[in-house]
Amino acid sequence: MTTNLLRQRTPRPARRPAGALLGLLVAGVLLAGCSQDADSAVSPADDTVGGAVGGAVDVSAAHADEGGSGQDAGGEAAARDDARMVVQTGSVHVEAEDPIAAARAVAADVDRRGGRVESRSESAASADGTATAVLVVRVPATSVTATIEELGRIGEVTAVDLQADDVTGTAQDLDARIHALELSVQRMEALMSSAGTTKDLLEAESALSERQAELESLQSQRARLADQVALSTIEVVVSGPGVLPVQTQEEDGTFLTGLASGWEALVTTVGVVMVVLGALLPWLALAGVVALVVMAVRRRRRPAPAEPAAPEPVVVGARSGSDEGGVRPGDDG
């Protein structure tokens, strides 16, 4: 029985290799397809990795030449500094013996440097104060330092206050908006040329007008900003004793001075009286009208005077009633 069992089991191991081979073949086909997909999926990454490696090699090669890279970096930094837009404003206080003459010298120096004087005010010296001059000047941004040095030669600089405002971002924003509006205007013009109906033409024309107005406003702001960057604004205040005006001394205690003083007092008094009369005249007129109305009302309310009674006639020789009824003593009867 043992022999029979061994004979029956021996064919089974012979059949297993065939099934295993079939399974291996199927697995190999599947693995081949997956490997192709994987290769196709990895190839871009390989290219990227290769590019990164190449970039790393380029960077290392660039670091190998430190002198050349330093020069390039310095040139780029200088270019960035030149591209910056800065608005400079400030004020300078100067003391001079003759502020009026010093102001003329400042104006001449600003004109010589290519700038201009925006405003100028001067006041001569008096007994109560010193002479002063105030100028608002616009000078090229590259000449601000030289202008302040020249002010130090004209007089004594006592105070300097300068501010710098970087407007590079504002300028770039305006440039971008202007460029976008220019493209929009061009598109609207193309739409107007291809408009098929009158309604479309009117709508395109209205939109074009709005965009052109906005574009002109932005261009005006950009030009104003460029002018502020190109020419710095500085307020120059010049003060000092100045030159006192010539005063004539009058003799005191003379007849002419007394007459002049009296005449001035008379004129002043008459002027004051006229002013007071002018202020009271409307009130006086109103008071007179009210008085007339009151008098008229009183006259109407007053009763009329009574007429006097007529006198009774007197009869000569008539006797009174008392005499008629009695006998007077002494009468004979």
Image (tube, rainbow, N blue to C red):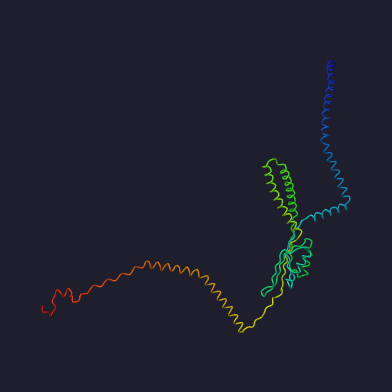
In the image: residue 82, left or right of residue 65: left
- Residue located farthest toward the bottom when viewing the structure as drawn: 254
Residue 328: x %, y % from top left = 14, 78
Residue 310: x %, y % from top left = 26, 71
Q: In the rendered view, tell whether residue 123 sits above or below residue 193.
A: below
Q: Quadrant of residue 204?
A: top right
Residue 55: x %, y % from top left = 85, 45
Of 157 and 115, which appears nearest the observer? 115
Residue 229: x %, y % from top left = 75, 58
In the image: residue 250, left or right of residue 23: left
Q: Quadrant of residue 330?
A: bottom left
Q: In the rendered view, tell whether residue 331 sits above or below residue 284.
A: below
Of 184 and 159, which appears nearest the observer? 184
Number of labelled discs?
Answer: 0
Q: In which quarter of the image is residue 152?
A: bottom right
In the image: residue 273, left or right of residue 65: left
Q: In the rendered view, tell whether residue 144 sits above or below residue 313.
A: above
